[in-house]
Image: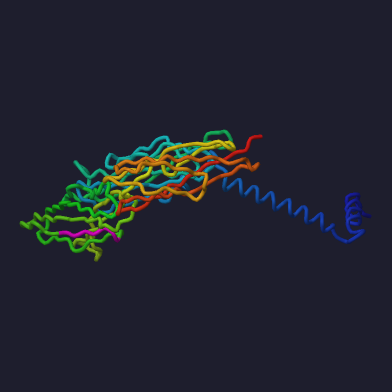
Amino acid sequence: MKTKAETESNTITAYLTSTTGTLPLCFVSLRLLQCCFTLFLLFFLFTKQITAQESWGAALFTTQRHDFGSVPLGTNAEFRFELKNVYNSDLRLLSVRSSCSCVSARLSATLLKPGETGAVIARLNTSGQHLRKNSSVLTLQIQTMVSGSRRTDTVQLFVSGFIRPDVVLTPGIVEFGAVAKGTAAERTVMLEYTGNPGWALMSVQRSQPFIYARAEEVRRQQGNIAYRITAILQDDAPADYVRDVLRFTTNESQSGRAVPVEILLPVQGVVRDPLQAKPSPIMLGILSPEESVTKNVVIRSETPFRIMSVSARDARFRFAFSDQESTVQMVSVSFASSISSGRTQDIADVIRITTNDPRQPGISVNAFVRVVPKY
């Protein structure tokens, strides 16, 4: 005799199989889609949503470790831990502290908008009394907003370096400063060594092709050795910030291994175009139909120059400028919007300015304006 439960089970089975013998295909597909969507949603929220428990700050950095290597006394040893705000809300860099006085740290900015980049700048202390081997942990506090709630995280950055008290660089960096494009620049650094009478520099390497360096021995008195290092920024350097490290190989080896010892000398500067335009780009704002606006672009140079012509593709732009030579020129940029087309127009154009400066016959400035119809 069948029990009550068995009877009910057979009844349900008979009902489900009475017509097709299986569950309806549309019912199975719908349930499968619902399950997949739920799993995808849970995965997205788990991987993308910032929570109070997970450490999300580390994902903002390209690296969290840096070894300065072998650094002489007096070297200006700095490293930028770059980070980017990849979230949709403002990122605040609250504070940074170092676990050791051998390394100091500062922030390039305290607020990063979505998509903006910044840096924690670590500087190795290469002066005064210190240990030969230095290491420090930089602790960074950051904060952002998620769904109206503050989320704070702590990121640790690790710095190390080997300080050489037997090698002194004066100055501790090759500082080219601001150099006009197309102009070469030369700087000198003195290297002094005290120790092994047979010590010597063997070679120098650099990563930028437009930087040249040479080392000339100027003194060798028993264990006191001096080199004059000449660094040259060549005239073909592009207009941009210059950051490089000169790596001098010595005839030493590391701890008995066949690995050459390097002495690092940082290089920095900026190469600028002869002509500098500000503001660049120029934002003319939001206009109504048949409205006009006028703003100025200032162009500077170290030597007097004359503006020959100013043009743009859009005929609604108008320009006014002086025909006299000067180290500072002003271009009046006017834009007159046309009759409304019934829709918003975003106008982007390039203002081309030609000059009589043989170093840079022309300069371009991007211009933007929006025309919004009246309703």
Number of labels in the image equals 0
Q: Answer whether residue 161 is magenta in the image.
A: no
- Image spot of residue 359 (x, y percent): 30, 54
Predominant secondary structure in magenta? strand
Please say whether residue 119 is visible from this viewpoint. yes
- How far from the left and from the top, in percent, is residue 352? 42, 50
Where in the figure is residue 366, as x and y percent of width and height? Answer: 45, 47
Q: Which residue is drawn at 57% across and 43% down?
A: 49
In the rendered view of the protein, which quadrant contains the C terminus? top right
Viewer-side residue, 102 vs 340: 340
Quarter of the image for the N terminus: give it: bottom right
Outermost bottom residue:
258
Q: Is residue 56 visible?
A: no
Task: Please give the name of the residue rendered at 25% of the width and 55% of the height, measured from the top-left corner.
Answer: 233
Depth check: 91 or 334 in front?
Answer: 334
Q: Is residue 175 left or right of residue 313?
A: left
Relative side of 196 to 174, left or right:
left
| Residues rendered magenta in the picture | 209-215
Residue furthest left in the image: 221
Quarter where residue 219 is shown? bottom left
From this viewpoint, which residue is outermost toward the front? 323
Position of 18 relative to 129 (above/below): below
Q: Is residue 212 magenta?
A: yes
Q: Which of 84 and 288 is in front in this view?
A: 288
Picture coordinates of residue 5, whole percent (x, y): 88, 50
Colour treatment of the image? rainbow
Q: Residue at x 24, y 55 (%)?
A: 184
